[in-house]
Image: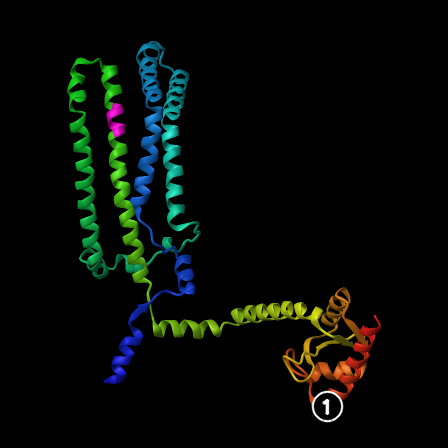
Amino acid sequence: MLKVDLQFFAEEKTEKATPKKRQDIRKKGQTAKSQDVNTAIILLAVFFVLLFTGSNMLEGLNRIFYQTFEEYVFQEVTTNTIETITLDLFQEVFMLVGPVMLAGFIAALLANYIQVGFISTTEPLKMKLEKIDPIKGFKRIFSLRALVELLKSILKVVVIGAIAFAFLWTHLKEILGLIFKSAGASLSVVGSITVKMGLFATGGLLFLALLDYMYQKYDFEKSIRMSKQDIKEEFKNTEGDPLIKSKRRQRQREIAFHRMMQEIPTADVVITNPTHYAVALKYDESKMDAPFVVAKGVDYLAQKIKYVAKENGVVMIENRPLARSLYHQTEIGQAIPEDFFKAVAEVLAYVYRLKKKV
């Protein structure tokens, strides 16, 4: 019974997703995202453009009507005239709606980038039979998420409807006065009221969208939680990946190399082969009772050690057998074996005498 309980708790998804799982899920195109944020930002951009270009659009519409009923209607209907009229009208319409479409396109890209950044994947486009599984579809329809989406939709209708009603109520006199205005003036007033009402309604939608994004993020984090057993399995698989092991070892070698290069200037002496081996030693009574190795290397690394030592004024002594033996029988950071005490003591004594003369 105890074993079953422990297994239950081990498989319960209570832990936050690891960076690796987040990366794997992101590659599949799964991220926390609210479609309402996209809709709100797109509408906000469109209505702002309409607010500043509405008068120009009205003039453009008047110009199109004028050309249609005053100029084109009296032209002879031929293939060339139809082609010319079509191209002219298409150009006029494009100049009117182009800024609005461009604003919506840029806003859509910006909204997606703000939420999920840049993701390039074809995973969501792949055919999956589970998407057309009626049983899973039935479960999705009557799931908690579906209920939340229903409540969100009702809330959006209520909030946006209330904002639109309040705006129209405050502009009721202006709307009722449209019967005394000309068609052009009425169209201008209706356009102005529509754009302003759209901005207010979009503001309410943006507020709801931010709340929805926080909920989507919470729901996404909850859905990608891992159990302790999942984390153990992931760690085991990661540790067994030869590529990751190789990268980790390479990183460790780089760190050890930089640390070793930083220690060379503090060495008392560098014992060389002179071409193949180099071992840097230091004697510090406060750290160890015997001299210890701060750096060692062979071939290219030996040349690098000698170069750094020369640049920092560290004494270099050529002793082929001693350099070779120290390299093979000592490790960086460890004291030299007792067998080398006498030989190293003679070298250090010579170095100290040399430094006193200098």
Q: Residue at x 43, y 64 (%)?
A: 20
- Residue 4 in the image: above or below residue 202: below
Magenta stretch bounds: 191-196
- On the image, the x and y values in percent for residue 85 come to 38, 18
Q: Nearer the viewer, residue 59 or 290?
A: 290
**Residue 273 seen in this snapshot:** no
Secondary element at tag 1: helix
Hey, which quadrant is residue 343 in on the image? bottom right
- Residue 259 in the image: above or below residue 67: below
- On the image, the x and y values in percent for residue 285 come to 66, 81
- On the image, the x and y values in percent for residue 351 come to 80, 77
In the rendered image, the residue lying farthest to the front is: 356
Residue marked by disc 1: 339
**Residue 227 seen in this snapshot:** yes
Say few, some or many: other residues with alpha carbon within 10 Å of mark 1 (under 14 / 14 to 19 / 20 or more).
few
Q: Residue at x 29, y 79 (%)?
A: 7
Residue 125 drawn in magenta? no
Q: Is residue 193 left or right of residue 67?
A: left
Q: Is residue 127 left or right of residue 279?
A: left
- Residue 249 in the image: above or below residue 169: below
Q: Residue at x 53, y 69 (%)?
A: 243
Hey, which quadrant is residue 4 in on the image? bottom left
- On the image, the x and y values in percent for residue 273 come to 79, 77
Q: Quadrant of the C terminus?
A: bottom right
Q: Quadrant of the N terminus?
A: bottom left
In the rendered image, the residue lying farthest to the bottom is: 339
Residue 195 drawn in magenta? yes
Q: Mark 1 is on which residue type?
A: Asp
Q: Is residue 119 left or right of residue 6?
A: right
Q: Residue at x 40, y 57 (%)?
A: 26
